[in-house]
Amino acid sequence: MNICVIGTGYVGLPTGVGFAELGHKVVCVDKIKAKIDALNAGKITLFEEGLEELFRKNAASGDIKFTTEISEAVPNADIIIIAVGTPPRAETKEADMRYIYEAASEIAERLSGYTVIAIKSTVPVGVGDDAEKIIRDKNPKADFDLVSMPEFLREGFAVYDFFNPDRVVIGSNNGRAKTVIEALYDSYKQKPNILYTNRRSAELIKYASNAFLAVKIHYINEIADLCEKVGANVYEVAHGMGLDSRIGSKFLKPGPGYGGSCFPKDTGALAYIARKANVDLSIVEMAIKGNGERKIAMANRITDALQGVAKPTIAVLGLAFKGGTDDVRESPAIEIISELLKKGFRIKAYDPEATASAKAIFGDRIEYAVSANDAAKGADVLVVLTEWEEFKSISLKELQMRTKVIVDLRKTFDKQIAIADGFTYIGIGE
């Protein structure tokens, strides 16, 4: 099939590369010329485990191409996948749909023959209706169906999730598009479970899923706080909870709060949708509030660990919002570091992939280390803010710190080993 993907971000690029790998002909469109120039020059523009190899392979074969001109991709496409950003508005936190509507408007003028248009971006309920109206108003003769096809790609695991989806959700208001969708997913070695719903249900499934996971994260963080007060161990509590099949073990690991491009944005957008519909989503609202407060509380926990230390240096391990990606959007690490900078601390940070992204935010206000050992050299406290596998192999004995204190907000190190190596160990929930 001929596929057009509009948007080459953390959803669009893995999606385009993935479908090219499955044998389709893909053209990716993005208005950012520098990004397209880099992709055409063979340079990957974001980090995802396993993506670069597939990108280079399919770009070399010509199965995926990149352009800034939507007119080069839309007319020949059997399916158009919209994967543009839907950032939150600063004041209301509602999702900004300008890029969705711009894409719909530009698509309308160039449609040729029957085409399925699939919105993969996360959008509020009813946006598919709006986008369809834009296209029909602008091109009444256009032969198309517009479906909701929400993405469920975890950053850091996007390539794996693309080829091994636990479900594919398709929201469609008629059955004609189903033939095209079936052909698209028949290219998988093992056809995924496809759930067909009406379009508005599909739009809400994505928001409801992400908000539930965010609430689960915040819940276990609150339980961790309780464990610290009553003498329980949150990891034992979480394990016991997770053995209940109704609860499950995932997203029950405490930490410095949720972040990234999805959970903060989607919880805020869902809360706005609910308020507009006069529905009280109190659980989501409280998770949003509590998550913001938690990052400040974790910054204070680090500050408390430095009591009595003159002109302390803080070594930070991790800048990305999670391991496996270079994305720092809404990263707890970024917000915690920002709080520490307000207090005047010297920060020396290391991240395997996200240094460039962090530099765009902090500039020279913090120092950037080339390794974990480099970050820790001369530091008074070692703070773990992101889960990267390589951090687990650090030899604490080899760290040349001035003061041997660890604030481990990701349960990276074994507490007893750290203490045996002479460290004061401060964790979460125990």
Image: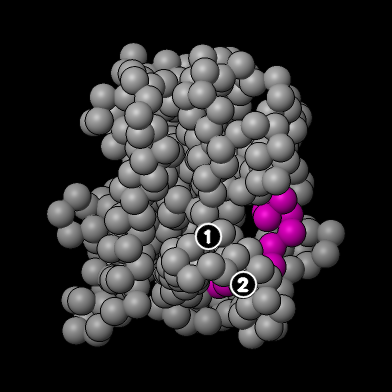
User: Residue drawn 70% across and 32% down?
Assistant: 421
Viewer can see residue 361: no
**Toward which corner of the image does residue 332 lie, by quadrant?**
top left
Disc marking residue 198: none
Q: Amino acid at mark 1?
A: Gly
Label 1 with label 2: CB-CB less than 8 Å: yes
Disc marking residue 429: 1
Instruction: State the SS at label 1.
Output: loop
Please state which of residues 238 and 380 is positioned toward the viewer in this rendering. 380
**Toward which corner of the image does residue 346 lie, by quadrant?**
top left
Please state which of residues 80 and 359 is positioned toward the viewer in this rendering. 359
Q: Amino acid at mark 2?
A: Val
Q: Is residue 165 magenta?
A: yes
Q: Is residue 235 magenta?
A: no
Total numbered badges shown on the rendered structure: 2
Is tag 1's residue or tag 2's residue first in the polypeptide sequence?
Answer: 2
- Span colored in magenta: 160-170
Tell me if 325 is positioned left or right of 343 in this view: right
Q: Which residue is mark 2?
A: 237
